[in-house]
Image (cartoon, grey):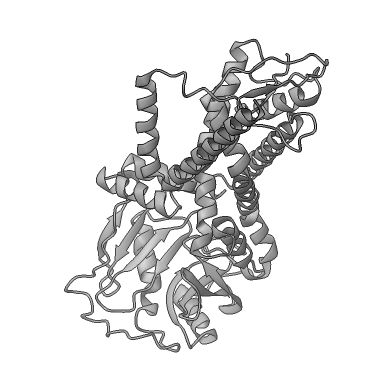
C-alpha cells in the first residue's frame, strides 16, 4: 500500500513508503483532520486517564492483598451478634458516631463498622474492622465512597478522577472522556474507508515496514477496541462535572433515574425508641441493639448477600439495608425498616427500576472493574494496554510522516469541510453546536482546535504570498 505524502498548510510534501515509492496528494478529509488534532492535543489526557483507570480496575484485587490483615481473619466458630460487633467497634472509636455496618457473610471475612468523622474529607468515613467470631477489633482505616474503598484504591481513584488537584483537576478527566469516543469513532470511519480501498480491516499486514506498518497496527488494534473505548467514554462522562450534570438532568426529565427509598419511619417510629443524639459507645440498647432484628427482617424479605445496614441517628428515620456492589451481583436492591417495630417502611427492588437506571448501574460497575470480578479487571487492563499502544503508535506515525528536516509531522490535508454541500455544512455545525452544549468541554476544545487550524491556515497563506 503506497504511503501518502505529508501536508504543510495546503502544500503536499512527498514522503516514501517502505518500498521507497513517492506518495501522492491525500484526499482532504474533515474526519482525518479532526482525528489528527484530537489525537495530538487530547491524547496525553486520554493516556493519563487510561493508565490511572487501568490501575484502578486492578485496585480491588490489590486491596484484598494489601489490606488482608483488616479484611480477613483466621478465627473459626460461631459468630457473635452484629450488635455486639458494632459495640466492639464503638469501644475502639468512642469519639465518633456510628453510621453503618457491613456484616461479615462468609467465613474468614471481617465485619466493617463505619463512623462519621468530620475531620475527614468528603465521602470519607472511618471504618473499624471486627472479627465476627471473637467480637474484637483487628484494626481501622479510612474508607471512601459507596464502594468503601480503602486508601490505596482511593488514592488511585483520585488520581484517575482529578490528578489529586481537587475540582480543577476534574477538567482533565472530563476532557479525556469527552473526546475518547470521538477519536474512536473517527478512527473507525477512517479505517473502514481504507478497507474499502483494498486495505485490511481486522488483521495487520506485517509484510510492510515503516509508517505503513505503524499505521496498520494503530488502525487494526483501534478497530478491535473501539466498542470498549466508546463504552469507557460514555460511562466516564456520567462522573464528569459539566457533562455529568447534563446527563443527570436528561435522565431526570426522561424518568430514567434510580428510584428513591423513603426512610421516614412514620408516626409509630420512636414509641419505644429513645431520641438519639450521637449514640453512646457503651449503649448496647438504642438503635444498635436492633441491628440484628432489622437484618433478619431484610433477609426474610429477599435482601440477601453482602449488605450495608445504615444505622439511623434519630427516631424518625428507618434503618436502610442495601445490597452492596459485588462481583456478579446484578440487582442491588434495598429496604427501609422501622427499628422500633421491624415493619417494612419502603422497598426499592432493582427489578422495578427503569431500564436506563439498570444499564447505568451495570455500566458503572463494569467501568470500575466490579461487575464480573477478576475477569472484569483483567479485561479492562487489556483494553487499557491496547489503548496505550494505539496512542503511542499514533504519535510514532505522526513523527514518521514528518517532512525532510522537520521535527514532527504535519496535519492532514485541508479542504474536507469546504467540499461538503451547504446542507451537510449546516447539519455539521448544528450537530456539533448541540453536542458542544451538552458536552461543554468537547465544544470548547473543538473551538480551540478550529482557532488553531485557522491561524495555521492564515500563516501558511501569508508565507506563500511573501514567498511569491
| Residue 131 visible in this rendered orientation of the protein | no
In depth, the one of 243 and 297 nearer the eye is 243
Residue in the picture at 26% in, 62% down = 262
Q: Quadrant of the N terminus?
A: top right
Q: Is residue 349 above or below residue 153?
A: above
Residue 92: image quadrant is bottom right
Q: Is residue 43 above or below residue 68?
A: above
Residue 359: image quadrant is top left
Image position, residue 148 (x, y; %): 52, 64
Outermost residue, left side: 267
| Residue 183 visible in this rendered orientation of the protein | yes
Q: Is residue 367 above or below residue 324?
A: above
In depth, the one of 262 and 174 nearer the eye is 174
Residue in the picture at 65% in, 38% down = 387
Residue in the picture at 70% in, 37% down = 395
Image position, residue 184 (x, y; %): 55, 33
Residue 221: image quadrant is top right
Q: Is residue 278 above or below residue 81?
A: below
Q: Quadrant of the C terminus?
A: top right
Q: Left or right? Give the position of 251 relative to 445.
A: left
In depth, the one of 159 and 438 nearer the eye is 438
Residue in the picture at 63% in, 53% down = 52
Amino acid at each position: 500500500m503506497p504511503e501518502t505524502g505529508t501536508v504543510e498548510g495546503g502544500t503536499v510534501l512527498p514522503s516514501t513508503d517502505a518500498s521507497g515509492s513517492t506518495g501522492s496528494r491525500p484526499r482532504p478529509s474533515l474526519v482525518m483532520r479532526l482525528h489528527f488534532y484530537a489525537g495530538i492535543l487530547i491524547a496525553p489526557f486520554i493516556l493519563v486517564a487510561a493508565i490511572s483507570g487501568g490501575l484502578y480496575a486492578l485496585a480491588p484485587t490489590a486491596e484484598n492483598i494489601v489490606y488482608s490483615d483488616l479484611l480477613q481473619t483466621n478465627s473459626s466458630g460461631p459468630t457473635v451478634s452484629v450488635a455486639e460487633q458494632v459495640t466492639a467497634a464503638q469501644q475502639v472509636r468512642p469519639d465518633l458516631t456510628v453510621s453503618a455496618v457491613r456484616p461479615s457473610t462468609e467465613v474468614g471475612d471481617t465485619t466493617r463498622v463505619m463512623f462519621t468523622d468530620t475531620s475527614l474529607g468528603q465521602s470519607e468515613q472511618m471504618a473499624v474492622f471486627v472479627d465476627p467470631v471473637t467480637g474484637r477489633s483487628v484494626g481501622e482505616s479510612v474508607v471512601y465512597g459507596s464502594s468503601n474503598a480503602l486508601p490505596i484504591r482511593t488514592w488511585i481513584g483520585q488520581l484517575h478522577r482529578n490528578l489529586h488537584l481537587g475540582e480543577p483537576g476534574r477538567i482533565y478527566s472530563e476532557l479525556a472522556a469527552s473526546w475518547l469516543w470521538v477519536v474512536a469513532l473517527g478512527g473507525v470511519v477512517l479505517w473502514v474507508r481504507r478497507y474499502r480501498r483494498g486495505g485490511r480491516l481486522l488483521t495487520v499486514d506485517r509484510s510492510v515496514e515503516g509508517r505503513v506498518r505503524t499505521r496498520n497496527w494503530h488502525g487494526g488494534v483501534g478497530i478491535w477496541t473501539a466498542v470498549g473505548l466508546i463504552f469507557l467514554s460514555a460511562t466516564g462522562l456520567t462522573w464528569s462535572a459539566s457533562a455529568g450534570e447534563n446527563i443527570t438532568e436528561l435522565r431526570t426529565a426522561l424518568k430514567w433515574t434510580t428510584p428513591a427509598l423513603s426512610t421516614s419511619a412514620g408516626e409509630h417510629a420512636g414509641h419505644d425508641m429513645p431520641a438519639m443524639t450521637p449514640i453512646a459507645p457503651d449503649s448496647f440498647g438504642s438503635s444498635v441493639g436492633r441491628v440484628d432484628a432489622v437484618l433478619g427482617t431484610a433477609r426474610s424479605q429477599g435482601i440477601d448477600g453482602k449488605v450495608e445496614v445504615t444505622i439511623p441517628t434519630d427516631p424518625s428515620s428507618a434503618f436502610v439495608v442495601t445490597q452492596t456492589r459485588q462481583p456478579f451481583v446484578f440487582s442491588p436492591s434495598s429496604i427501609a425498616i422501622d427499628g422500633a417495630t421491624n415493619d417494612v417502611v419502603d422497598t426499592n427492588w432493582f427489578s422495578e427500576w427503569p431500564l436506563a437506571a439498570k444499564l447505568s448501574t451495570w455500566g458503572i460497575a463494569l467501568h470500575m472493574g466490579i461487575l464480573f470480578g477478576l475477569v472484569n479487571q483483567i479485561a479492562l487492563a487489556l483494553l487499557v494496554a491496547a489503548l496505550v499502544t494505539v496512542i503511542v503508535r499514533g504519535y510514532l506515525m505522526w513523527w514518521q510522516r514528518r517532512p525532510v528536516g522537520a521535527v514532527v509531522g504535519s496535519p492532514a490535508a485541508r479542504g474536507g469541510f469546504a467540499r461538503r454541500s451547504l446542507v451537510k455544512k449546516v447539519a455539521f455545525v448544528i450537530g456539533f453546536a448541540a453536542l458542544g452544549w451538552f458536552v461543554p468541554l468537547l465544544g470548547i476544545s473543538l473551538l480551540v482546535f478550529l482557532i488553531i487550524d485557522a491561524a495555521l491556515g492564515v500563516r501558511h497563506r501569508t508565507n506563500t504570498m511573501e514567498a511569491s
